Amino acid sequence: MEMAAPAKSSADSVVAHGGDDVGEEQRRRRRRPDTKEEGGGDGDGCASHHHPAVDVEAGGTHGSDAASAAAAAPPPSPTTTTRRRLVSLDVFRGITVALMILVDDVGGIVPAISHSPWDGVTLADFVFPFFLFIVGVSLAFAYKKVPNKVMATKKAVLRALKLFIVGLILQGGFFHPLHDLNYGVDIHKIRLMGVLQRIAIAYLVVALCEIGLRVSSGGGDIGCDYMLIRRYHRQMLVGLVLVVMYLVILYGLYVPDWGYEVTSPGSTVKRFLQVKCGVRGDTGPGCNAVGMIDRSVLGIQHLYTRPVYLKTKQCSMDSPRNGPLPPDAPSWCEAPFDPEGVLSSLMAIVTCLIGLQIGHVIIHFKKHEERIVRWSIPSLCLLTLGVSLHLFGLHMNKSLYSLSYTCVTTGTAGLFFVVIYLLVDVKGYKRLAFPMEWMGKHALMIFVLVACNIVPVLVQGFYWKEPRNNLLKLIGIGG
């Protein structure tokens, strides 16, 4: 699947893929050392885009620095090209992993950084879109050259399937909460969707778009924005279609009344609760089209049983923390709801597609200024659009993955990536960023072992005389 670097066989490469910062021009120069680098048109109204031979690293050198570097350096071999990893990709991913651990561990103590109960965004609500964004960026490296589309498609499907299965095991309920030494899950009640499952779906769709929906450049280098858009306009069209589908279904689908069974705490008696809806376009917790589709397609027994709206004022006396239900709590408060559901995954794919376009800029433009401008302008536009939509009533909502939420989080991710790129790959602060770089290279492993509580669950299995006297209690985590 990956032509620029040796392909990884594990699902970890789906989440953690760096990329060698070598453009198309350098690859052609390696194959044709006698080719002259002179001007001339490309036949599409854009000046041809050539870079000096020393411009192999992200951005290379410019002006007098480039001339002195070329004079001092020995002539490069026409058959070899130095490949340098774009460190900012790993650092971005590593910071996202660290942020995820922070909000998971501290969010219960500081609700201000935990997930928003419904409308609005907090620090925790930026983590998942950042993951999807950087997966899209990495896919531009993974598929920058695809000689065999059938083989590349098979590898993409296999990788997505591996990641989906890992997510099903980790987040489907097989591993029980802390202080519970049991494991296993009733297949009838297993949670089908989750963070890794959604990443797998977005990865597969965007990978297929990159494999089959780009226009051939005809051997010419991409030297301007028009040619970049022309080559990848089909992928952008897919993103637009997904947005329109999401909005039409969310605001146009009729949501009828529905009900569910719930068991009271400390009792085996089941109660049936009825939720009154009969509306279209509702974006509240109880009567939205996102939840209705998940209940119909996945089944209510396969949805997440601790939805974030349990922290709303309607459902918690200790809001914005989880707490006892108020006496007049709405009937939907105890209903399952999956924040990684079917309909909302359409917008998650859009986030990944936008990241892919950011990655295309890295592939086709080698100068720092060119990249930064082409990242900053669309990111600022997305951020402005998202805030405007929120102010006009299309509220930011992670559980629904609303359009305004998509624009704000993706625009923020793009600007944050620009900052990291400036500090790490332009200014050269790579030693300071090494811890985050290491975390970024091992993102899936850290997610599995730490964020999914696999390490604590394993550690608490060692106890003294009684299960409550385990190592977690010794280090202050257990109780």
Image (spheres, rainbow, N blue to C red):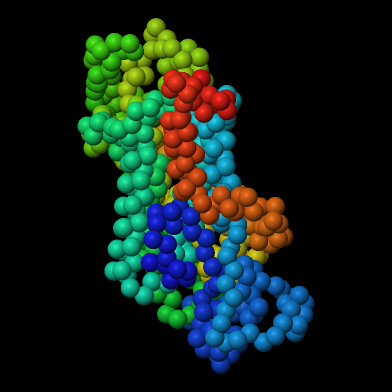
Res. 457 image quadrant: top left
Residue lying at 37% horizontally and 37% vertically, measured from the top left = 171
Residue 30 seen in the figure:
yes
Q: Name the residue at the top extreme.
A: 327
Count of labels shown?
Answer: 0
Near-viewer residue (390 or 435)? 435
Residue 164 on image: x %, y %: 33, 47
Residue lying at 55% horizontally and 89% vertically, measured from the top left = 33
Near-viewer residue (62 or 438)? 438
Q: Name the residue at the bottom extreme.
A: 34
Res. 425 image quadrant: bottom right
Taking the image as shown, residue 101 lies to the left or right of residue 339, namely right
Residue 196 on image: x %, y %: 39, 45
Taking the image as shown, residue 96 lies to the left or right of residue 252, namely right
Res. 47 image quadrant: bottom right
Residue 356 seen in the figure:
no
Residue 339 on image: x %, y %: 39, 34
Q: From this view, report whether residue 143 is shown above or below residue 167.
A: below
Residue 139 on image: x %, y %: 45, 60
Q: From this view, report whether residue 182 is shown above or below residue 317.
A: below
